[in-house]
Image (spheres, rainbow, N blue to C red):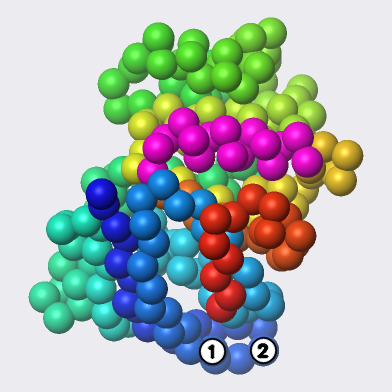
C-alpha cells in the first residue's frame, strides 16, 4: 500500500504579508482528506507543491518509495510524472473544445473506451458535442471530474471544487466527487471552507 509522505516548508506572500507554511504528515492510500483553514494559511499552496507546480523551500515529498521532491539533493520530479490530477476552482475547461474533446485532452494516448466509460459514469452522454459555454455549473464540474480521471491518476487534488456551485446542486456534486475518489482507488485531497462538507465527505480532516 502506497503512502504519501509530506514534510515541507514554504515562505508565502499573502495579502496580509509574509506567512510561513510548515506542514508534516502522512496520507494513506484510499484516504479522502479535506484540508481546512483560514484564507491565506497555505491550503492551495500545499496542493500546488504536491502537484509540482510550486516548489517547497525545504523538505521532501514522497509517494511510496519514490521521492517527488527532495530539497537536499535538489530533486524535483516533473508534474506530468507524478500521476496527479489537479481540479482547479474554475474547472479550467477549454472553451473551444467540446465536452468529449476536453476529456480526451487529458490522455497522453487516446483511449476511447475509457472516455465513454467516464461519460457514462458522470451522466454526460447527451453533452459530448457541447462546448463549456452552454453548460451549467454542475455540468462543468462533472466534465472537469471526468477529465481529471481520464489520465488514470494515483492522486486527485481538488481546490474548492464546489465554491462556484449553488447550494441546491452542492449535495449531489459532493456525491459525484466521492464517486470519482472511489473510481481512482487512490488518494483524494480536497480544499474546502465548509466544515460541514468536510465532515460529510472526508475520512480525515486536516486543519492548516
Secondary structure mostly seen in magenta is: helix
Q: Residue at x 59, y 55 (%)?
A: 202
In the picture shown, does residue 94 fall above or below 62? Answer: above
Q: Residue 51 lies in what quarter of the image? A: bottom left
Magenta run includes residue 168: no
Relative depth, front residue between 169 and 29: 29
Give the SS element for disc 1.
strand
Q: Residue 43 lies in what quarter of the image? A: bottom right
Q: CA distance from mark 2 to mark 1?
A: 8 Å
- Would residue 124 appear left or right of 28 to someone viewing this image? right
- Mark 2 Cα-neighbour bin, 10 Å: few <14, some 14–19, many ≥20: few
Q: Residue at x 69, y 42 (%)?
A: 174
Give the SS element for disc 2.
loop
Relative depth, front residue between 76 and 63: 63
Label drawn at residue 16: 2
In the image as oriented, which residue stretches furthest toward the right?
168
Residue 114 in view: yes
- Where is residue 156 shown, x and y percent of the image? 46, 46
Label drawn at residue 183: none
- Where is residue 12 shown, x and y percent of the image? 50, 82
In the picture shown, does residue 114 fall above or below 65? Answer: above
Q: Residue at x 29, y 83 (%)?
A: 58
Q: Residue 3 lies in what quarter of the image? A: bottom left
Which residue is disc 1 drawn over? Answer: 19
- Would residue 13 appear left or right of 156 to someone viewing this image? right
Q: Say if mark 2 contacts mark 1, CB within 8 Å.
A: yes
Give the position of the C terminus as an image quadrant: bottom right
- Where is residue 69 shown, x and y percent of the image? 23, 67
Magenta run includes residue 178: yes
- Mark 1 Cα-neighbour bin, 10 Å: few <14, some 14–19, many ≥20: some
Give the residues in magenta.
171-186
Q: Residue at x 60, y 28 (%)?
A: 143
Amino acid at each position: 500500500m502506497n503512502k504519501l509522505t509530506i514534510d515541507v516548508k514554504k515562505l508565502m506572500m499573502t495579502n496580509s504579508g509574509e506567512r510561513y507554511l510548515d506542514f508534516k504528515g502522512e496520507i494513506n492510500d484510499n484516504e479522502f482528506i479535506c484540508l481546512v483553514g483560514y484564507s491565506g494559511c497555505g491550503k492551495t499552496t500545499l496542493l500546488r507543491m504536491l502537484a509540482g507546480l510550486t516548489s517547497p523551500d525545504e523538505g521532501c515529498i514522497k509517494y511510496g518509495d519514490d521521492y517527488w521532491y527532495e530539497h537536499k539533493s535538489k530533486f524535483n520530479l516533473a508534474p506530468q510524472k507524478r500521476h496527479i490530477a489537479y481540479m482547479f476552482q474554475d474547472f479550467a475547461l477549454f472553451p473551444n473544445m467540446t465536452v468529449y474533446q476536453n476529456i480526451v485532452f487529458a490522455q497522453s494516448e487516446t483511449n476511447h473506451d475509457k472516455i465513454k466509460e467516464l461519460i457514462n459514469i458522470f451522466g454526460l452522454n447527451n453533452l459530448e458535442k457541447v462546448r463549456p459555454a452552454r453548460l451549467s455549473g454542475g455540468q462543468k464540474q462533472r466534465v472537469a471530474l471526468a477529465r481529471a480521471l481520464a489520465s488514470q491518476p494515483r492522486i486527485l487534488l481538488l481546490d474548492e471544487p464546489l465554491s462556484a456551485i449553488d447550494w441546491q446542486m452542492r449535495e449531489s456534486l459532493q456525491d459525484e466527487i466521492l464517486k470519482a475518489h472511489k473510481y481512482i482507488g487512490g488518494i483524494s485531497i480536497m480544499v474546502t471552507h465548509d466544515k460541514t462538507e468536510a465532515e460529510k465527505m472526508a475520512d480525515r480532516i486536516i486543519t492548516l
